[in-house]
Amino acid sequence: MNIYDKALELAKLLADTKEYKDFTAAKENLSKNQICREILDNFRQVQLEVQVAELTGHEVDEEVKEQLERLYDIISTNPTITEYLEAEYRFSRLMSDIQKIIAEAVPEWFELDINRNALN
C-alpha cells in the first residue's frame, strides 16, 4: 500500500462528494453575481474586524455593529449568498471530520508537548 496513492484516492473521493459538488456549483453561481460577491466580501471583512477587536479586548464601535447587522440581514434574505454559505459550511464540516479522523490516528503529531518544549 502506497500512502500517496491512498491520499490521491481520498482526494478523488472528496471531489466526487455531494458536499463538494454543491459547494462548487454554489461558488460558480455566486461568481456570476458581482453584487452578491461584494456583499459577502464586505460582510466577511466587517465580521473579521469585529472578531479581531473582540479578541484583542477592544470595544467594537456601535456603527460597525450596526453595519454588520445590516449586512447580515441582506445576506440572510439573499438565496445566492445563503446557498453558497450553506454549501461552504457543509463541505468545511466534511473536511474537518476527515482531518479529525487523521489526527486521531496520529495523535503524537498533533499534541502540544509543553513539558518536552520546556526541557529543550
Image (tube, grey):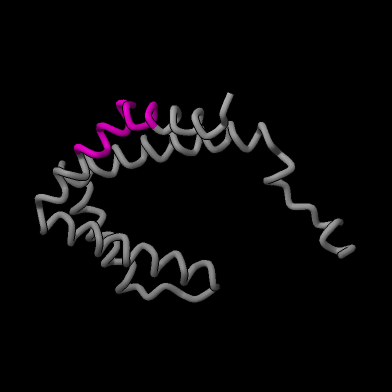
Residue 118 left/right relative to 37: right
Q: Nearer the viewer, residue 96 or 119?
A: 119
Where does the image place residue 5, in percent across and percent down from the top left? Answer: 49, 30
Query: Which residue occupies 86% across, 56% down?
Result: 115
Q: Is residue 92 left or right of residue 55?
A: left
Quadrant of the frame with the N terminus: top right
Q: Please tell me how many numbered marks the rendered image carries.
A: 0
Judge left or right: residue 90 versus residue 40: right
Q: Classify 40 as above or below 21.
A: below
Q: Which residue is drawn at 66% across and 33% down?
A: 104
Tell me which secondary structure the magenta stretch mostly adopts: helix
- Which residue is the extreme one toward the right? 119
Picture quarter containing residue 84? top left
Position of the C terminus, as image quadrant, is bottom right
Seen at 44% across and 27% down, the residue is 9
The residue most toward the front is 2
Depicted 108 relative to depicted 94: above or below: below
**Part of the protein shown in magenta:** 12-25
User: Does the magenta run of residues contain 53?
Assistant: no
Query: Residue at 45% across / 64% down in the picture?
Result: 51
Q: Where 120 sits versus 24, above or below? A: below
- The quadrant where residue 21 appears: top left
Q: In x, y percent, where is residue 87?
A: 29, 37
> x%, y% of residue 73?
22, 53
Horizontal side, residue 91 vs residue 21: left or right: right
Does residue 19 show up magenta in the picture? yes
Residue 96 at what x, y percent from top left? 49, 38
